[in-house]
Each structure stands twice: as structure tokens, then as C-alpha cells.
Amino acid sequence: MLNFILSRILSAAIVVLGVSSLVFFLIHLVPGDPVEVMLGESAQPTDRTALRHALGLDQPVAVQLLDYFSGLLRFDLGTSLHTQRPIADLLLERLPATIELTIAALLIAVAIAFPLGVLSAVRKDSAWDHGARVVSLLGISIPHFWLGPLLILVFSLWLGWLPVSGREGMASLVLPALTLGTALAAILSRMVRATLLETLGEDYVRTARAKGLAEHAVILRHALCNALLPVITVLGLQLGALLGGAIVTEMVFSWPGLGQLTIEAIHRRDYPVVQACVLLISVTYVGVNTLTDLAYVWLDPRVRLQ
């Protein structure tokens, strides 16, 4: 068990290191100069040179990479090129909004997926099952950048029930959370249906029915509990993917989270902020996947024996 945990932690560290290096090189290959963005095109060459030297942008890329990793070892994310504020402070300001949106989207996805998946499995090949398949297909197929404006058009502009954008109270959370959680709900519902159908054919389920247990007890206490292991794996993987989807959703709804901060930093060519945002998202993604692996081992002793 200890070797399994250490191997997962080591592989997670290697992935984070690779992502950090890749993002560093890609962001430096993006056309544009942060000095021109900050000073404007009419700035004097001497002013550009002085600012570039003050920011350390005149150093070779290898030197900048070493400085970047040395800062990470000291838990120092650096300073924003645009605002000259510590990047850690910027992340702490935006992180609560992203966490709030991610948790709300996850709750919506689970609330939709489990009843839909169970109903589809229990009434296989019925009209309910076909309807659930259509809903799942639509949820997977519709992209966030299309669904978000559609929800704004219907519920904000036509009906006037919810705010268009921003983060002002619980009402402004409904549309972005629904946009972000729809795709996850579709994936989870199909997984719940598939695993529950497989579990309903097991011998212990037939034994429970033969003992005279009520059908809802057989489904919820015996079949569904044993069908949750693959669902937990998918849920852990998709929870990290929610952070990536939050970038588009936050821009559509002007949600002041990490996604919006990342896009703003890319537009300003603020290299340290972009690197810090991607690093935080990747660490969260890898951390969630690692915890999912450990939870799977804890729930299924057969994995531990392997």
C-alpha cells in the first residue's frame, strides 16, 4: 500500500513538472511583447530596454526557466508584470470564485446524473431510457461557449429571471454552474446506467430479490453501492476537467475566477501569472486524480492486492 501511494505521488510530481516546463516554453513562443503591452507602441526604445531589464525579460530563456523553478522551490510564484502585485495574492482573490463555481457545477451534475442514470438502467429500452440517452447526448455535444449564451438569452434576456453576468449573490451562480455541470451530468449518467445494468445481473442481486427485499432496497442498497466504483473514477477525472471548462464559462459569464484571470494574463502577455494559473490548475487536476486512485484502492481491496 505504501509503495502504491509513493508511486502515485512520484508520478504526479513528474506530471506537474512536465506541465510547468511545457507551459513556460509555450508562453514564451506566443507572439507579442509584454513590454509593448505595458508601455504602448509609442514608447521610446530606451524605456523599453530599461523595463525589459527591470523585469528580467532580457535574460536567456534557460536563465528565466531556472529562476522560475528556483522560485517554485521557495513557494514564490513571483510578481505580476502588469500590476506588480504578488501573484499569490491574485490567485487567492480569484480562487474562491472558481471553487464556488466548480462545487456548484458538481452538485448540479450529480443531482441530474444519478436519478437519470438509475431511471435509465431500471427501465432499460423504455421511453424513459431513450429520453435519457437523448438528454445525455445533447449534454455531451453542446459546447460551453454555445450553451452559456443560449441560457443567458432565455433566462436573463427573455424571462428576466437571472442576472446576465457577474458574481452578485446566489442567483448569478445558477447559469454558469448549469452551463459547466451539464456535460459532466451527461457523462456521469451514462456511466451510472452502464455500471448499474452490469451490477443488476449479478448473483447477489438475484439473491436479494429472492429474499423478498423491496425493489428500491435492492437497487439502492445492493446494486447501486457496488456500481459506484467506476463512477467514482470518472467523477475524479472529470472534476479536474471542470477547472479547464471553467475558463470558457467564466469568460462567457464574466465570472471573476481563475479562468478569467488566465485569459486576461494571456492578453497582457503577463507570463508569470499565466504560468502560475496553469500550474495551480494542473496541480489541482493531478491532485484530484491521485486522491481518486487512493480512494479506489481504499474502496476496492482487489486493487490493493494487485
Image: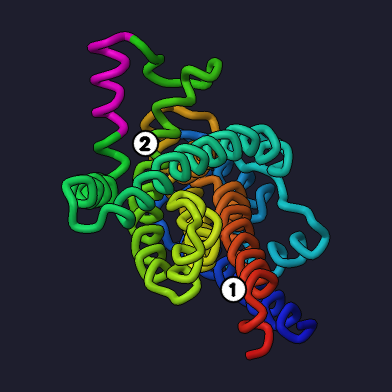
Of the 4 image quadrants, the one containing the C terminus is bottom right
**Nearest the camera: 170 or 306?**
306
* 150 in the magenta segment: yes
Stretch of the chain drawn in magenta: 148-160
Residue 191 x/y as whole percent: 38, 61
Residue 139 x/y as whole percent: 28, 46
Q: Label 1, on which residue?
A: 15
* Real-space Cα separation, disc 2 to disc 1, in angstroms: 29 Å
Main secondary structure found in the magenta portion: helix
**Nearest the camera: 112 or 247?**
112
**Amino acid type, mark 2:** Thr
The local secondary structure at tag 1 comes to helix
Of all residues, the one furthest to the top in this rendering is 160
**Amino acid type, mark 1:** Val
> Visible in this render: residue 36?
no
Q: How many marks?
A: 2
Q: Residues within 10 Å of mark 2 (few under 14, many from 20)?
A: many
Is the C-beta separation of discs 2 and 1 under 8 Å?
A: no
The first of marks 2 and 1 along the sequence is 1
The local secondary structure at tag 2 comes to helix
Residue at x 57%, y 54% (from the top left corner): 281
The answer to which image quadrant residue 81 occupies is: top right
Mark linked to residue 179: 2
